[in-house]
Amino acid sequence: MKKKPLAENQTFISILASLFSIVIGLVLGLVLLLILNPGAAFGGMATMLSAGLSSLDKLGKVLYQAAPLMLCGLSVAFAFKTGLFNIGASGQYTIGAFAALVCAIQFQLPWFVCLLASALGGALWGLFPGLFKALFNVNEVITSIMFNWIGMYLVNLLIANMPVMLAAYWGASNADRTAALKDANPGALIPKAGLDKLFNSSWINISIFIAILVAVLVWVVLQKTTFGYELKACGMNRDASRYAGINASRNIVLSMIISGALAGLGGGIYYLSGTVQYVIEKSILAMGFNGIPVALLASSNPIGTIFSALFISYIQVGGAAMQPNFSSETTDIVIAVIIYLAAFALLMRGLISKALSRRGEKGATKK
């Protein structure tokens, strides 16, 4: 069997591009630390790169934070694979979180029903950009950005007018956030299944396994089913897919629904952990936007999102450990540099492909 040239091995190129992008991001992050605090720069970078594995508790936090990141990354990656740019993952994530919390606090339902509700809430919020794109050819970037803000303000309005949802109703002093699930409905907490004792961590639960399972299912759908083939065909060439008899409009809507469901599930997983409460505020939740570099770093590969989400969660935990030598604002800037330079994996992929092709051509010429 003839060995495939490296220039044609897309898996190898994608992995190499991601690694190069990560290294560039880390180098520029170190340069930034040297500018801000030269004396502590190398120690700070060492802390960032080692803190996530310094204890089981820190590792548990890495896994806990990676789960919603993974699902938001899957949301963006799924849309990318079908030729769409879902920049509305944040709004879908927020609506999904709201649906999960309403089911948990208002209706006292168990955690698995709340998670299903979060996926349905995200799917509903993904439906609108999909319909506008399919029926009126309105760019999904515009509509999904608008729906981010609509979703945030709608959730804030509804929670503020649902007394049972607020922490103050359950005896807490906070009136600007949802009730703690341990007080309102312990049955809505995602089970820890003994992982908290294994990792000696209050953070971790089974959500990381749910997220990995979803990533594998998305990969199977895209790679092994006729439905997935049709979705990807629409993404590669919508006109050609129509000519081949594929219903492009239907697939656009379904793609955004599935993408929204994934982001919504991420919101449900995060807020049903019991470690955080939804706060009524005027800024869009960042988790959905963080899904973009996760997807880009993984080259939109569902399995790749598992590893890219773990990496980004790892450096976030490491960044938090850099304090007090560096302020939280400084670590946030460094992490942002690393994350968003890591998103250059797509550009690096093209450069590596060209370099390998030229190398192959030179080798063929010499022969």
Image: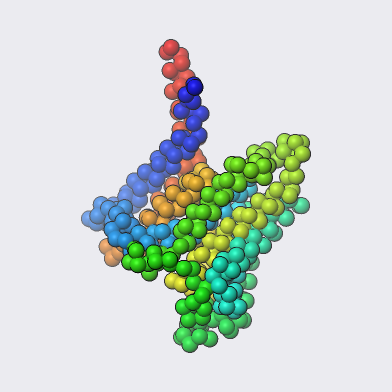
The image position of residue 56, as x and y in percent, is 32, 61
Which quadrant of the structure image shows residue 120?
A: bottom right
In the picture, residue 57 is in which quadrant? bottom left
Counting from the top left corner in percent of width and height, residue 28 is at 36, 47
Q: Is residue 137 visible?
A: no
**In this rendering, is residue 76 above or below 225?**
below
The answer to which of 231 and 296 lies nearer the viewer is 231
Q: Is residue 153 left or right of residue 315?
A: right
Q: Residue furthest left?
A: 39
Is residue 61 among what the camera can see? yes
Name of the residue lying farthest toward the front? 193
Give the answer, above or below, for where 79 lies relative to 282: above
In the rendered picture of this protein, how many numbered marks are placed on residues?
A: 0
Q: Residue at x 74, y 48 (%)?
A: 249
Q: Residue at x 67, y 42 (%)?
A: 226
Indicate the position of residue 58 as horizontal and vertical percent values.
Answer: 33, 61
Q: Position of residue 286 (x, y in %)?
A: 50, 61
Q: Quadrant of the C terminus?
A: top left
Residue at the (51%, 80%) spot, across then down: 184
> Which residue is at a point 45% across and 33% down the rendered structure image?
352
Color encoding of the figure:
rainbow
